[in-house]
């Protein structure tokens, strides 16, 4: 239909009338919102008389909005206008006799006037008049809670549960109230009741327990969980929560026992047990981790999707357990070697078993002193088709290390350079570059080595950056006259001998350095290198003796903080002198606060002191 000018004008006029009508209807809402905002500003700034006037006006205009009425009463109480507050409350109770929250407000009014008996009467009346309505019960309990009347709030919820014929309907709310009261047994009991009716609440309860429970309260939680597991053997949420409790307490063995039981009951794949094994391994509880992995190997077998991963992880944990503690025999090493070979024979030599072959090569080179076998294993491994690039790169770095230990400098630098090129921006590339720079340092090319160390000071790896910084400063401090360069070269050659495990030759080189250059600035470094040799030989008392000499005679030297840190670690891990370790860690972060070890020393000190970190 063709629009005429008259029709167009009529439509425009009608639209304008509609807009005006909408504005007319919205204006009161806009004005009300402005007044509410202004009232809030007055209330927040303590201008209760102005706020009260506005809240009374808003309440009358809003068709009896409870929020405005309660704020109006709050203003009257703040002004100590108790008479008008009581009149308003009586009028409101008459108008809304079923609104039991009003009795709580009335009781608070009496309490402000120190009329405790009358206040108690009103509070009890509120609970007595409560009806079997979940919303009503919750609002009343919240009214009590907002006044920190936790006992009355608890009574409200408990009576509400009776009225609704469901004793656990408010158990989560009761848990929260008992937590606020500091009643841990009842808090835990109610939270666990809430879990029985709503198992999906497990994660939120774990967060609450982690945040609020002390060690003693974890004992209570553990005891209550044992009781519930016995009473409700089919409820899986309780053993699941108990396993979590054990993990929080670093009791991984018991955590694994619980998850093994769950795994069998639910006919699961073992993944739950495997994950706790990973947590235990990360926390260096290798016995517990092995226990988890062996369960999957023995009970799930080859059909399990995590069978091979469990085998690998179990072997890795056994290796770490043997070598990290520096407490092993030739027999321990040979047993471990045999287990690696059984695994490789079972699953073949391929890209899947490559990481295990690399671990065996490290075992052969660094602990069984069979570098020929180690080099053979890695040369075979890096030729596997489809090998993961990172596994390949890591294998080449290890192979380069072994070549360097055998004095094959050219082969070593070639492999380091390949990895550096392939992983330029990756930490693995930085590590290869660092080792290549250190190779130049061993060879006496100090200026080029220092230039590389200066670049690596910006590495994203804190460990590489710190080591690069240390070596850069070390070279800078010792470069100078020809005689100094000669001394530095003797020292770097001894460093290489230590890396190659040629300890007797290293001692000869270090002693000759001390003989030819008495009083040289490298004397503390000589002691530091000797401490590393004794550490490798597992002569921890001699290693400790060398570090003590550095601390006593060269407190201002660049090795002082290194010596303190190494000595602290020795006392913590090998010498079992925790008090001494604490003393040394504390000395680092107080007297050597600028040291790269200061932050870690503080963490270790706090952990040994028993702080919750």
Image (cartoon, rainbow, N blue to C red):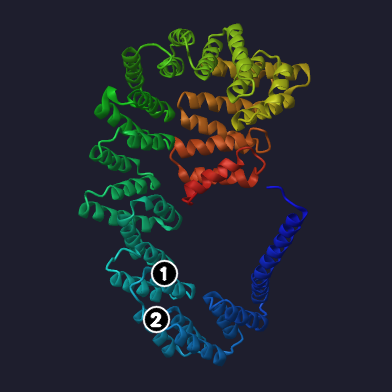
In this view of the protein, can residue 117 be seen by the observer?
yes
Q: Residue at x 43, y 90 (%)?
A: 118
Residue 241 higher or lower than 121, as above or below: above
Which labelled disc corresponds to residue 442? none
Of callouts 1 and 2, the N-terminal one:
2
Residue 599 higher or lower than 529, as above or below: below
Closest to the observer, 89 or 525: 89
Q: Are marks 1 and 2 in contact (CB under 8 Å)?
A: no
Q: Residue at x 37, y 79 (%)?
A: 127
- Image coordinates of residue 344 in percent, x first then y, are 35, 14
Q: Residue at x 59, y 42 (%)?
A: 599
Q: Residue at x 64, y 45 (%)?
A: 591
- 281 relative position to 73: left or right: left
**Quarter of image, res 186:** bottom left
- From the image, tell me which residue sits under label 1: 181
**SS type, badge 1:** helix
Residue 217 higher or lower than 165, as above or below: above
**SS type, badge 2:** helix
**Quarter of image, res 6:** bottom right
- Image coordinates of residue 170 in percent, x first then y, are 35, 65
Q: CA distance from mark 1 to mark 2?
A: 21 Å
- 605 relative position to 595: left or right: left
Closest to the observer, 420 or 521: 420
Closest to the observer, 540 or 241: 241
- From the image, tell me which residue sits under label 2: 126
- 352 relative position to 441: left or right: left
- Image coordinates of residue 541 in percent, x first then y, are 47, 32
Q: Residues within 10 Å of mark 1 (few under 14, many from 20)?
A: some
In this view of the protein, can residue 285 be seen by the observer?
no
- Image coordinates of residue 608 in percent, x first then y, are 48, 46
How many marks are shown on the rendered structure? 2
Q: Residues within 10 Å of mark 2 (few under 14, many from 20)?
A: many
């Amino acid at each position: 239909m063709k629009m005429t000018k008259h029709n167009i004008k009529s439509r425009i006029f009608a639209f304008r009338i509609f807009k005006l009508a909408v504005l007319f209807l919205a204006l009161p809402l806009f004005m009300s919102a402005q007044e509410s905002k202004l009232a809030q500003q007055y209330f927040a700034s303590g201008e209760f008389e102005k706020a009260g006037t506005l809240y009374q006006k808003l309440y009358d205009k809003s068709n009896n909005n409870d929020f405005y009425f309660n704020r109006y009463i709050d203003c009257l109480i703040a002004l100590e206008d108790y008479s008008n507050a009581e009149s308003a409350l009586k009028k409101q109770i008459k108008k809304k006799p079923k609104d039991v929250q009003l009795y709580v407000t009335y009781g608070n009014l009496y309490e402000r006037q120190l009329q405790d008996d009358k206040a108690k009467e009103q509070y009890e009346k509120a609970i007595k008049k409560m009806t079997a309505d979940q919303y009503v019960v919750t609002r009343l309990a919240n009214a009590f809670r907002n006044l920190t009347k936790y006992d009355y709030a608890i009574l409200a919820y408990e009576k509400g549960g009776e009225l609704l014929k469901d004793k656990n309907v408010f158990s989560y709310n009761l848990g929260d109230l008992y937590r606020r009261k500091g009643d841990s047994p009842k808090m835990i009991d109610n939270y666990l009741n809430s879990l029985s009716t709503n198992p999906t609440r497990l994660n939120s309860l774990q967060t609450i327990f982690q945040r609020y429970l002390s060690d003693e309260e974890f004992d209570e939680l553990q005891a209550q969980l044992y009781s519930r597991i016995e009473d409700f053997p089919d409820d899986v949420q309780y053993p699941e929560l108990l396993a979590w409790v054990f993990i929080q307490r670093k009791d991984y063995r018991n955590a694994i026992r619980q998850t093994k039981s769950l795994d069998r009951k639910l006919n699961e794949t073992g993944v739950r047990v495997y994950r706790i094994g990973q947590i235990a391994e990360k926390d260096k509880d290798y016995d517990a981790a092995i226990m988890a992995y062996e369960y999957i190997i023995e009970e799930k077998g080859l059909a399990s999707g995590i069978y091979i991963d469990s085998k690998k992880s179990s072997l890795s944990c056994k290796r770490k357990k043997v070598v990290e503690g520096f407490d092993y025999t030739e027999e321990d090493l040979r047993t471990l070697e045999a287990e690696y070979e059984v695994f490789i024979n079972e699953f073949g030599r391929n890209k899947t078993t490559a990481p295990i072959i690399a671990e065996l090569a490290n075992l052969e080179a660094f602990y069984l002193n069979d570098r020929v076998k180690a080099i053979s294993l890695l040369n075979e491994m890096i030729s596997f088709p489809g090998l993961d690039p990172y596994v390949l790169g890591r294998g080449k770095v290890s192979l380069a290390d072994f070549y360097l230990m055998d004095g094959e400098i050219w082969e070593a630098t070639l492999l380091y350079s390949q990895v550096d090129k392939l992983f330029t921006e990756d930490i693995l590339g930085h590590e290869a570059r660092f080792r290549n720079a250190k190779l130049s340092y061993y060879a006496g090319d100090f200026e080029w080595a220092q230039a590389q160390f200066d670049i690596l000071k910006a590495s994203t790896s804190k460990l590489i950056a710190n080591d690069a910084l240390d070596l850069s400063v070390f070279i800078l401090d010792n470069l100078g006259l020809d005689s100094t360069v000669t001394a530095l070269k003797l020292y770097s050659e001894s460093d290489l001998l230590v890396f190659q495990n040629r300890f007797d030759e290293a001692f000869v080189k270090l002693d000759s350095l001390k003989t030819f250059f008495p009083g040289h600035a490298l004397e503390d470094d000589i002691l530091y290198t000797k401490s590393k040799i004794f550490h490798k030989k597992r002569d921890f008392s001699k290693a400790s003796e060398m570090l003590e000499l550095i601390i006593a005679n060269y407190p201002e030297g660049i090795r002082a903080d290194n010596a303190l840190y190494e000595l602290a670690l020795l006392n913590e891990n090998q010498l079992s002198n925790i008090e001494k370790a604490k003393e040394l860690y504390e000395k680092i972060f107080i007297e050597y606060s600028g040291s790269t070890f200061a932050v870690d020393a503080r963490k270790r000190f706090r952990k040994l002191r028993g702080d919750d970190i």
